[in-house]
Image (tube, rainbow, N blue to C red):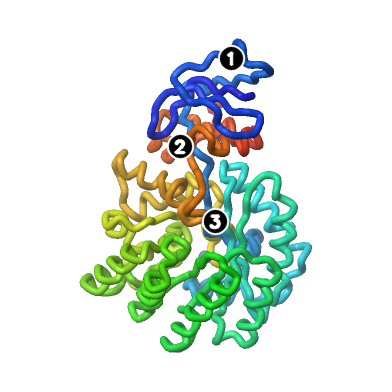
């Protein structure tokens, strides 16, 4: 048994938490006495915040750390970023992809994330080598996190010869999610055909869909509404997620509102990945933040989450995997600047992301649920975000598996 005393549970307040030997919450109430409980280990949380572990549903572990020696580029557009990765992908080996992916997974866990979803490029440059490497990293880290793998046609399906066949092979190799990138196609008709194929693959393998949708500042990229329409028709709801969804920001207000109403009606999720898009500037001045319509979507009741996306690769020189880092950038790009909206951001990193990861999962600090828990050294959520607080105890299935300490000293 493990007793955590004096924890300030987010949304609930001060409480003691008893965790059974099966790794599930046994009792949560203002005071639980350790005396009389056999073999009871005690942690004193000293009033620190307690929250469920983070869920990060949009990663690219196959590409992580490819820019450790610097990002070989002088241009900073999305198209350029995709191009930078081509050379890396042609030289992938299973071992080096596994090593980079495993390192990135472990770092995400060290910041208190125990549920992760990653895209893996499937195309005629990476072939299935990146996937093999990431699947090996998944196997090597299965004791510290749950990882879902998306078959992701970064270069398009019809714009990249051979990818359609590779997508089916990737699913046979064990991908958990059907991915897509319709904006990579040359024509609107092909983008629709691309979305149709992703639904066909998802139906055949009975897996969720998580696509990069309209990841551009081109107002004519309009796969989002088509995807939402198919989601509604098929009744797939939260099993479908749109990543980035940027171009809706550049569409006129009446069209954007119509599309957001459709997304809400369909019940699909949006995962805005603000950190990467905010830094990829392709505008003339005044530069925009390049993110989806976060505030309007949240206000309309659409499930909006956010995730890290990439760590130090052709797209993004930075990125740590710490949800409090990319959550803070989310607060800046959404211009969320109140305690209430700090909670909105925190929900995006936890419950809203979990709705993407598994809409049916029992998640949160409740009796009977898996004790996947972070103790954060902060008095409240905005302080946790502001200081990217230390996390002295990170638990998965009732066991302390990691801790993260932020240290600074004046000497
Ligand atoms: Zn992405």
Q: Vertically, is 231 above or below 18?
A: below
The quadrant holding residue 262 is bottom left
Task: Say what secondary structure mark 2 lies in.
Answer: helix
| Residue where numbered disc 3 is placed | 318
Residue 60's label in the rendered image is: none
Q: Count numbered badges in the picture.
A: 3
Residue at position x 40%, y 63% in the image: 268
Between 168 and 75, the one lying in front of the other is: 168
Q: Earlier in the sequence, mark 2 or mark 3?
A: 3
Circle 1 Cα neighbour tier, 10 Å, few/some/many (<14 / 14–19 / ≥20): some
Estimate the x, y position of residue 274 in percent, counting from the top left: 43, 58
**Mark 3 residue's CB less than 8 Å from ligand 1:** no
Q: Nearer the viewer, mark 1 or mark 2?
A: 1
Residue 34's label in the rendered image is: 1
Between 246 and 33, the one lying in front of the other is: 33
* Mark pair 2, 3: CA separation: 18 Å
Circle 2 Cα neighbour tier, 10 Å, few/some/many (<14 / 14–19 / ≥20): some
Estimate the x, y position of residue 6 in percent, counting from the top left: 48, 20
* Mark pair 1, 2: CA separation: 33 Å
Q: Vertically, is 114 above or below 71?
A: above
| Residue where numbered disc 2 is placed | 387
Task: Say what secondary structure mark 3 lies in.
Answer: loop
């Amino acid at each position: 048994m493990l007793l955590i005393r004096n924890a300030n549970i987010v949304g609930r307040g001060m409480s003691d938490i008893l965790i059974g030997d099966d790794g599930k919450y046994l009792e949560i109430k203002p005071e639980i006495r350790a005396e009389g409980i056999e073999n009871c280990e005690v942690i004193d949380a000293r009033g620190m915040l307690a929250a469920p572990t983070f869920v990060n549903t949009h990663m690219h572990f196959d590409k992580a750390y490819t820019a450790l020696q610097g990002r070989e580029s002088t241009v900073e557009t999305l198209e350029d970023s995709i191009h930078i990765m081509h050379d890396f992908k042609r030289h992938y080996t299973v071992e080096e992809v596994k090593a980079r992916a495993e390192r990135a997974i472990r770092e995400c866990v060290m910041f208190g994330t125990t549920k992760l979803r990653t895209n893996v490029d499937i195309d005629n440059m990476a072939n299935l080598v990146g996937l093999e490497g990431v699947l090996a990293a998944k196997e090597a880290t299965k004791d510290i996190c749950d990882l879902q793998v998306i078959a992701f046609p970064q270069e398009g399906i019809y714009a990249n010869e051979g990818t359609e066949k590779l997508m089916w092979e990737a699913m046979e190799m064990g991908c958990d999610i059907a991915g897509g990138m319709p904006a990579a196609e040359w024509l609107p008709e092909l983008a629709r055909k691309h979305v149709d194929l992703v639904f066909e693959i998802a139906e055949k393998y009975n897996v969720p869909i998580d696509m990069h949708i309209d990841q551009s500042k081109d107002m004519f990229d309009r796969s989002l509404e088509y995807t939402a329409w198919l989601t509604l028709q098929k009744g797939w709801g939260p099993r479908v997620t749109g990543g980035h969804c940027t171009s809706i920001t550049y569409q006129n207000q009446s069209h954007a509102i119509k599309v957001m109403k459709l997304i809400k009606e369909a019940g699909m999720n949006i995962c805005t990945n603000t950190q990467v898009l905010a830094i990829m500037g392709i505008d003339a001045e005044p530069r925009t933040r390049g993110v989806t319509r976060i505030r309007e979507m949240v206000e309309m009741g659409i499930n909006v989450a956010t995730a890290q996306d990439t760590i130090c690769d052709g797209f993004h020189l930075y990125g740590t995997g710490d949800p409090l880092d990319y959550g803070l950038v989310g607060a800046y790009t959404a211009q969320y600047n109140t305690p209430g909206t700090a909670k909105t951001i925190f929900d995006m990193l936890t419950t809203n992301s979990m709705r993407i990861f598994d809409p049916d999962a029992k998640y949160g600090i409740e009796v009977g649920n898996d004790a996947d828990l972070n103790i954060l050294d902060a008095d409240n959520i905005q302080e946790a975000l502001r200081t990217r607080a230390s996390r002295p105890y990170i638990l998965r299935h009732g066991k302390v598996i990691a801790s993260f300490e932020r240290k600074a000293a004046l000497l």
